[in-house]
Image (spheres, rainbow, N blue to C red):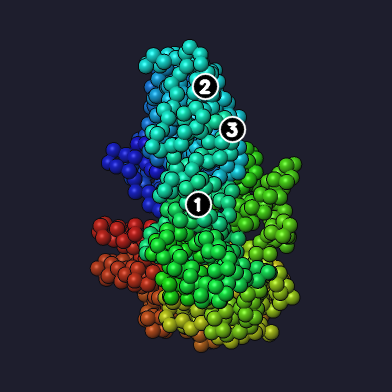
């Protein structure tokens, strides 16, 4: 048995890898293995399994994954290897010999390698250590923060090992092998300066000086283009070593080819020798046909000058003087001043963006979109997401594809200064293409026609930035089939898609690694690596929005004494976050204001009210409740907001707000907050009532509505029970957030109602960590001094605690409930309280008292003529009678209960009654009938998705039959329960 972290998280056995299942179970295994033989708390596991706020039922999900993982290990005979997954209070520990864990063997091999006197022995051990890696560390797991940090640490250790292996090869004089080892990693990590420096040194010592110098210039350009920084001391020292021809601190023995790097004389930056007697090899000059002759017969360029571009976009070869700037990267020639007799391509592009990070998929999508005939590529996204940066990055990377020029115009569609006149944009384009000023037409139509004519046979790129609508784009489209038009906009510009087959490339916020890399690009990698947790937190608080990240980085760059953690604490306060994300005339608020000012008033009102939404997502009904409108009007407003990328549609009829947009929207109408909150709370109450009535139509309403209840204009209609239960499950987290917001705002009468109305889902998924939410409801009921509410909440909470095995706590709560119900005149509530109390009494062995209380509950329900509560009381009474070894009475109670309601209603209750009936038949020796009833109960539970009921029925079946089909169905039901989280 072998546990793997260095690659895909897995457990290998003689029969193959264990089927670990979903990513979160692999994450749990990874977290336990990273702390092997040490207890790992539930809290730490929660951080590893969820990146955002964990669900309320996180503990149950973790317990389920632990149970399944333990079963897998037991099934693989893990105990024979000394492997055991143990529960220790509120923590778990995975005990195993460290030799079974690949990361531990990796560390052991590194320690052994460090102790070797012979470089050859060290090479063998380091190669064996690196052979343990089968891909990026912790692959296949959900990358929670702790696991991301661990994966980063492991990767850093691997890269350090590669560098150590290269040094060992160098000691053996095998510099070409050192270079081969380092090159693969330097390509994969192009901005890791230590790798680049080591590779340069290895290449130089192998007699490959020109490659070493080329690698330095390539890395220097990359650092400047991507991060806006100069090479660090390691890279600079390696470069200086090559220029002066020195051996370096550990040049090693002579290379196999007989060259001794230390014997070379000084080498000038142009690659020539110094005239000494032992100069090393110099780079060969390019063929005469591809170069212009310089003073030394090479292809020299003057200080700061770049090599001239050849027809077709290729540049000639060069050998640079010491003052030369970096040349263009391969395949990316840069524009140069024209020379006599050479065409001068027009280039109006602004400079390439500094510190550009990520966007690999979007750049590739742009390349695909630009591959058609006369394509129009449309980059869309919210304010500050980096649309212009993406467009310019792509344009600069692909300059060779457009030898006839690159045009650029800022259409200022979202600017205080207003849009430029179309004729002015066309005039600038025409002048740039060589049209004499007096020949530029005065009308837009004529100028556009001339522009199309001039571009008909050219390969031209036209970048139209910041467009507000489709109409301004069309006259600016070039005429050539080889021309590419690149448009950026905060709007979706669906008209341009319809009329000109524009190919959209939507742009979203940056992923966390790219966000922190952007910060590092401005602040320097050392400053970010010194506070990795704070950097990640800053990226989260900025919501991955490049504009917000750049403003944050600008604030920190100008204040070297500030810590990242300190600024993160400032940004954590939502009241001032947007203020901290503005600097000078640039910032998130300014960008959003320019977008909002283009909206009609109804969309502005809707956005302002969305800012007060306590939940994470919304549908047209929720939006309408917030804005005080109806769903039709709300849908139209949401469509306008989505077109402007102010809201994002995550599914049909389901939208979300970016956190920074939410804060901005909240500030648009702060006085409207209480009204919006009441509206959405009452919307949730109305919808949850409709869902509960559809899911459990025989159920008694658990309360009257608040006195100042505001009924929504429209309430969602649920066609059947599955639809209602799906809504309750999908909205669980937002209903919890709404209840918390209600309690915080002092609307206690709404808080407990919103929670209590989820009772069908509580019954359906009773072991799904409902107690914290119900305890909040209990606090609100008591704060409102409502005996009715307190009794009802105690009933449900006590029952949940009983199901969770917290019997003593359940008794303490439930004993108070009947008296509170009587005080409130709630006879049905009293009956429910007696039922739940009886369940606990039965579990504690007080069967006589339990039977008496449950019988009293049946009488109260009959007196109130409430079939639903009577059926509930009979269900539990039957279970207690069966426990008391009175199967005949149990069967009679089940029959009476089933006669009270139609069979298609109360699915959960019917399943439990059939299960009790089947067990009663087994007790009477009627095995065939008992198995038939239990099989019927399990089947109905499976068909309706009631996994708790399926598990109970199948457990009872497995006690009397070893039928493989029942075991398989039982395992599947348990797995569904586990993996639901």
Residue 267 is labelled as 2
Asked which secondary structure carries label 2, the reply is loop
First reached walking from the N terminus: tag 3 or tag 1: 3
Label 2 vs label 1: CA separation? 36 Å
Mark 2 surroundings within 10 Å by alpha-carbon count, few (fewer than 14), some (14 through 19), many (20 or more): many
Q: Which mark is nearer the camera, 2 or 1?
A: 1
Quarter holding the N terminus?
Answer: top left
Q: Where is 403 relative to 267, above or below?
A: below
Mark closer to the chain start, 2 or 1: 2
Judge whether residue 386 can be spotted in this image: yes
Q: Give the alpha-carbon distance from disc 3 to disc 2, as whole Å.
A: 15 Å
Q: Tag 1, which secondary structure?
A: loop
Report the side of 572 relative to 8 (left or right).
right
The residue located at (46%, 45%) in the rendering is 309
Whole-percent x and y of residue 648?
A: 53, 68
For disc 1, the marked residue is 344
Report the side of 576 relative to 701 (left or right). Answer: right
The foreground one among 961 and 321 is 321
* Viewer-nearest residue: 285 or 121: 285
Q: Which residue is mark 3?
A: 323
Callout 3: helix, strand or loop? loop
Q: Note whether residue 617 is visible.
A: no
Image side of residue 218 versus residue 351, left or right: left
What is the quadrant of residue 627 in the picture?
bottom right
Disc 3 crowd rating (10 Å Cα; few below 14, some 14-19, many 20+) is: few
The quadrant holding residue 592 is bottom right
In the picture as drawn, the residue positioned furthest to the top comes out as: 277
Frontmost residue, 645 versus 447: 447
Q: Is residue 334 above or below residue 157?
A: below
């Amino acid at each position: 048995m072998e546990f793997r972290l260095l690659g895909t998280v897995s457990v290998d056995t003689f029969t193959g890898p264990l089927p670990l299942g979903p990513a979160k179970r692999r994450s749990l295994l990874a977290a336990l293995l990273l702390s092997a033989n040490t207890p790992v708390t539930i809290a730490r596991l929660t951080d590893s399994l969820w990146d955002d706020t964990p669900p309320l039922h996180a503990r149950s999900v973790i317990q389920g994954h632990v149970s399944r993982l333990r079963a897998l290990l037991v099934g693989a005979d893990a105990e024979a290897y000394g492997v055991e997954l143990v529960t220790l209070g509120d923590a778990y520990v995975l005990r195993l010999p460290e030799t079974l864990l690949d990361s531990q063997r990796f560390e052991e091999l590194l320690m052994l390698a460090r102790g070797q006197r012979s470089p050859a022995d060290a090479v063998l051990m380091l190669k064996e250590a690196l052979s343990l890696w089968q891909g990026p560390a912790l692959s296949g797991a959900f990358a929670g923060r702790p696991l991301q940090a661990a994966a980063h640490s492991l990767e850093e250790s691997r890269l350090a090992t590669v560098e150590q292996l290269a040094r060992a090869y160098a000691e053996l004089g095998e510099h070409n092998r050192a270079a081969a080892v380092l090159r693969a990693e330097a390509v994969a990590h192009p901005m890791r300066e230590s790798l680049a420096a080591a590779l340069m040194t290895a290449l130089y010592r192998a007699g490959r000086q020109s490659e070493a110098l080329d690698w330095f210039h390539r890395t220097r350009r990359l650092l400047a283009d991507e991060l806006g920084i100069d090479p660090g001391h390691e890279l600079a020292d390696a470069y200086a070593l090559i220029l002066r021809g020195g051996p370096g601190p550990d040049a090693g023995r002579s290379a196999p080819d007989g060259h001794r790097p230390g014997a070379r004389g000084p080498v000038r930056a142009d690659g020539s020798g110094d005239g000494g007697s032992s100069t090393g090899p110099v780079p060969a000059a390019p063929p005469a046909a591809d170069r212009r002759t310089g003073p030394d017969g090479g292809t020299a360029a003057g200080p700061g000058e770049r090599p001239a571009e050849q027809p077709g976009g290729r540049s000639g070869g060069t050998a640079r003087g010491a003052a030369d700037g970096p040349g263009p990267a391969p395949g990316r020639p840069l524009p140069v001043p024209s020379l006599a007799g050479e065409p001068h391509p027009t280039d109006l592009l602004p400079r390439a963006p500094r510190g550009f990070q990520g966007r690999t998929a979007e750049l590739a999508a742009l390349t695909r979109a630009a591959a058609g005939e006369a394509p129009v590529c449309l980059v869309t996204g919210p304010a500050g997401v980096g649309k212009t940066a993406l467009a310019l990055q792509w344009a600069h990377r692909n300059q060779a594809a457009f030898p006839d020029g690159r045009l650029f115009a800022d259409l200022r569609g979202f600017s205080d200064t207003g849009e430029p006149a179309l004729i002015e944009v066309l005039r600038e384009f025409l002048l740039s293409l060589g049209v004499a000023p007096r020949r530029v037409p005065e009308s837009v139509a004529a100028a556009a026609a001339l522009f199309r004519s001039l571009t008909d046979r050219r390969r031209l790129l036209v970048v139209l930035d910041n467009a507000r609508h489709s109409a301004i784009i069309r006259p600016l489209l070039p005429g050539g089939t080889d021309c590419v038009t690149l448009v950026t906009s905060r709007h979706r510009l669906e008209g341009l898609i319809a009329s000109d087959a524009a190919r959209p490339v939507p742009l979203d916020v940056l992923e966390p690694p790219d966000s922190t890399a952007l910060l590092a690009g401005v602040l320097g990698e050392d400053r970010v690596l010194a506070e990795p947790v704070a950097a990640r937190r800053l990226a989260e608080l900025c919501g991955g929005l490049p504009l917000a990240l750049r403003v944050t980085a600008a604030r920190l760059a100008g204040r070297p004494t500030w810590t990242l953690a300190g600024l993160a604490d400032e940004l954590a306060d939502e009241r001032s976050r947007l203020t901290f994300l503005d600097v000078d005339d640039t910032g998130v608020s300014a960008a959003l204001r320019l977008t909002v000012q283009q909206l009609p008033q109804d969309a502005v009102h809707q956005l302002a009210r969305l800012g007060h939404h306590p939940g994470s997502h919304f549908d047209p009904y929720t939006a309408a409740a917030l804005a005080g409108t109806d769903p039709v009007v709300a849908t139209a407003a949401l469509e306008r907001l989505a077109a402007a990328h102010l809201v994002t549609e995550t599914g049909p009829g389901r939208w979300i707000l970016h956190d920074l947009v939410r804060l901005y929207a909240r500030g648009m109408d702060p006085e409207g907050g209480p009204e919006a909150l009441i509206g959405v709370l009452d919307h949730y109450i109305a919808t949850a009532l409709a869902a509960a009535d559809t899911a459990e139509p025989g159920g008694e309403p658990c309360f009257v509505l608040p006195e100042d209840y505001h009924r929504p204009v429209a309430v969602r209609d649920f066609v059947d029970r599955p639809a209602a239960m799906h809504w309750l499950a999908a909205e669980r987290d937002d209903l919890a957030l709404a209840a918390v917001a209600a309690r915080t705002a002092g609307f206690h009468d709404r808080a407990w109602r919103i929670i209590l109305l989820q009772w069908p889902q509580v019954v359906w998924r009773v072991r799904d960590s409902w107690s914290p939410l119900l305890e909040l409801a209990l606090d609100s009921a008591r704060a409102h001094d409502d005996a009715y509410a307190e009794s009802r909440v105690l009933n449900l909470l006590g029952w949940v605690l009983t199901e969770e095995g917290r019997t003593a706590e359940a008794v303490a709560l439930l004993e108070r409930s009947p008296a509170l119900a009587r005080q409130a005149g709630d006879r049905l509530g009293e009956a429910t309280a007696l039922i739940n109390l009886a369940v606990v009494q039965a579990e504690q062995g007080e069967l006589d008292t339990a039977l008496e209380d449950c019988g009293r509950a049946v009488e109260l329900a009959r007196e109130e003529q409430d079939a639903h509560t009577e059926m509930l009381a009979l269900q539990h009474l039957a279970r207690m009678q069966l426990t008391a070894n009175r199967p005949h009475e149990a069967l009679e109670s089940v029959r009476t209960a089933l006669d009270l309601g139609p069979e298609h209603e109360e699915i959960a209750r019917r399943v439990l009654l059939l299960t009790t009936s089947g067990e009663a038949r087994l007790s009477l020796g009627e095995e065939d009938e008992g198995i038939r009833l239990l099989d019927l109960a399990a089947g109905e539970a499976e068909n309706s998705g009631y996994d708790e009921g399926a598990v109970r029925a199948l457990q009872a079946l497995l006690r009397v039959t070893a039928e493989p089909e029942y075991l398989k169905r039982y395992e599947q039901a348990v797995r569904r329960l586990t993996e639901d989280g």
